Image: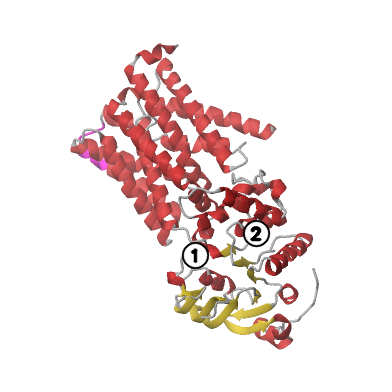
């Protein structure tokens, strides 16, 4: 296994009873890659992310993380996860921004072990990098959708991950916040060498933001550089013959 | 006013009550934010079945029987809930009504209710023995130490269980630990507050503190202060008004809740 391959799926299938969700997926994600995953609703995008995270067990096939079989991989904190609608924290949940960011450091530090001074510095840095430092003592449920999304990213960064996996990260976030959010992801990818994998329903966003794209509709429809593979025929294979591309920009 | 402390049984009631006042919201906050407020009530009913069985079998201190029954039930609830074949609240309903049914059968086999059993329903300071105080303090220290050790992890799971699992935390083990701590807390508290009211002491101070606490730690500290206040004022009320301690404590907690609701709205 090449050192640069961080996530590798080989012949992965997944089904719920008789319903086949993913069929025979084989692909890998390299260090520093910025991968967008697109596909129709119910096409298996979130299931694929959960298999990569070890939250779901594939029915067939194998998953390797950092060159190790996922069952023998004990450093899950190296892959940070921002789930779908992570910004939908209940308003009444009693947690400050800093308390939420801190939880991203727990697995890296080790269960039952207190944080060190260095841990606290890394937590502060994560808040500074994402521009939420001034809200550190605010109840997280009182922030806007865009601010909460930044809290999710800060929480993920507090674990100093190699890979950041995001599921529909900007759903429910306004346009201005969406633009600055993708700028932040680009910075993390380029300047901090964090590998980014994100699911989006927005083909245009994937085309403009991601370096590579994986098209999924139960099976792998395409995988390659987004500028090369995102053609009209691929979109039609993904979404059906009636699909029309209307470009927009953030 | 301090003549109350001339009586050994009241001193024991205060010792046990203060320990319960600290651990009830300490565990209660994790149940409340995870929408498991009914867990405390369920485990209290299981404890009652345990006490009935303990008295029936002639166990010297039936609180031990309650402890065993509620820990076993807590692990069972956690297992069934984790299986996801039954809704979480349905699991609680099964255990709540099932354990009450067992208690009623055992009481019937023992030829009726007796005063001893009634004292467990509503709490009675007069029945708190030296052995009870030692048990409550000892197990209370264990509960506090466990929460202190795994505070960060328990908070993480309470905030987002799936995220905690994705980061590599052993969520099932930590959930089981939480359930066991809840079971221990409930069974220890019934001497003072009673089976029917312990749920309230674990929940009301927490939701009161949530009206003004910004963070989890603030809210927890606020809940403990409110709970201690409710227990102290309630025990005084119980002694001077000659009313059951459980009712007096929970009624005080309710008054404090109303106060926090009003002050929370005005702030």
Q: Is B163 on the left or on the right of A249, as rendered?
A: left
Name the mark on residue A54: none
Q: Residue at x 55, y 34 (%)?
A: B222
Write down the residue under mark 2: A153
Q: Position of residue B10 (x, y in %)?
A: 36, 19
Q: Residue at x 45, y 25 (%)?
A: B248
Residue with the most extreme left position: B58
Asked if residue B91 shows in the view, the reply is no
Q: Nearer the viewer, residue B189 or B250?
A: B189
Write down the residue under mark 1: A75
The chain carrying label 1 is A
Q: What secondary structure is marked by label 2?
A: helix
Q: Are marks 1 and 2 on the same chain?
A: yes
Q: Nearer the viewer, residue B111 or B183?
A: B183
| The C terminus of chain B: image quadrant | top right
Magenta residues, as a range? B104-113
Q: What secondary structure is marked by label 1?
A: loop
Asked if residue B207 shows in the view, the reply is yes
Q: Is residue A181 above or below residue B124?
A: below
Q: Is tag 1's residue or tag 2's residue first in the polypeptide sequence?
A: 1
């Amino acid at each position: 296994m090449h050192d640069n391959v961080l996530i590798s799926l080989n012949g992965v299938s997944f089904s719920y009873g008789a319903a086949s969700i993913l069929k025979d997926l084989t692909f890998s994600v390299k260090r520093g890659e910025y991968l967008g995953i697109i596909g129709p609703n119910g096409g298996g995008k979130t299931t694929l992310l959960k298999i990569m995270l070890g939250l779901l067990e594939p029915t067939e096939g194998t998953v390797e993380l950092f060159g190790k079989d996922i069952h023998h991989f004990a450093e899950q904190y190296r892959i940070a996860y921002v789930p779908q609608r992570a910004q939908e924290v209940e308003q009444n949940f009693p947690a400050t921004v800093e308390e939420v960011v801190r939880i991203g450091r727990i697995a890296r530090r080790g269960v039952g072990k207190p944080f060190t001074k260095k841990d606290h510095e890394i937590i502060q840095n994560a808040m500074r990098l994402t521009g939420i430092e001034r809200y550190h003592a605010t109840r997280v449920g009182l922030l806007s959708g865009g601010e909460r999304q930044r809290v999710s990213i800060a929480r993920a960064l507090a674990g100093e991950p190699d890979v950041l996996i995001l599921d529909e990260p900007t759903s429910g976030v306004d346009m201005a916040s969406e633009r600055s959010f993708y700028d932040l992801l680009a910075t993390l990818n380029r300047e901090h060498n964090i590998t980014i994998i994100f699911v989006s329903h927005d083909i245009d966003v994937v085309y403009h933001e991601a370096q590579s794209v994986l098209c999924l509709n139960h099976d792998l429809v395409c995988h390659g550089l987004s500028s090369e593979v995102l053609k009209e025929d691929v979109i039609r294979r993904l979404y059906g013959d009636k699909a029309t591309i209307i470009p927009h920009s953030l | 006013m301090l003549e109350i402390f001339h009586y050994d049984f009241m001193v024991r009631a205060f010792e046990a009550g203060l320990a319960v006042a600290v651990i009830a919201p300490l565990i209660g906050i994790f149940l409340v934010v995870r929408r498991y407020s009914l867990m405390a009530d369920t485990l209290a009913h299981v404890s009652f079945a345990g006490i009935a069985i303990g008295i029936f079998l002639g166990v010297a201190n039936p609180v031990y029987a309650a402890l065993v029954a509620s820990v076993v039930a807590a692990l069972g609830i956690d297992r069934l809930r984790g299986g996801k074949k039954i809704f979480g609240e349905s699991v609680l309903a099964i255990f709540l009504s099932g354990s009450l049914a067992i208690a009623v059968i055992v009481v019937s086999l023992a030829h009726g209710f007796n005063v001893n059993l009634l004292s467990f329903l509503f709490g009675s300071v007069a029945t708190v023995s030296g052995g009870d105080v030692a048990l409550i303090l000892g197990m209370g220290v264990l509960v506090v130490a466990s929460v202190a050790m795994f505070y960060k992890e328990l908070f993480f799971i309470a905030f987002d269980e799936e995220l905690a699992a994705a980061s590599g935390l052993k969520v099932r083990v930590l959930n089981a630990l939480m359930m066991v701590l809840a079971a221990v807390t409930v069974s220890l508290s019934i001497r003072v507050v009673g089976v029917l009211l312990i749920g309230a002491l674990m929940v009301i101070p927490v939701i009161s503190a949530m009206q003004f606490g910004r963070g989890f730690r603030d809210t927890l500290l606020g809940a403990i202060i409110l709970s201690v206040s409710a227990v102290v004022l309630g025990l005084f009320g119980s002694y001077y008004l000659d009313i059951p301690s459980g009712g007096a404590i929970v009624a005080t907690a309710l008054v404090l809740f109303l106060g926090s609701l009003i002050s929370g709205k005005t702030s």
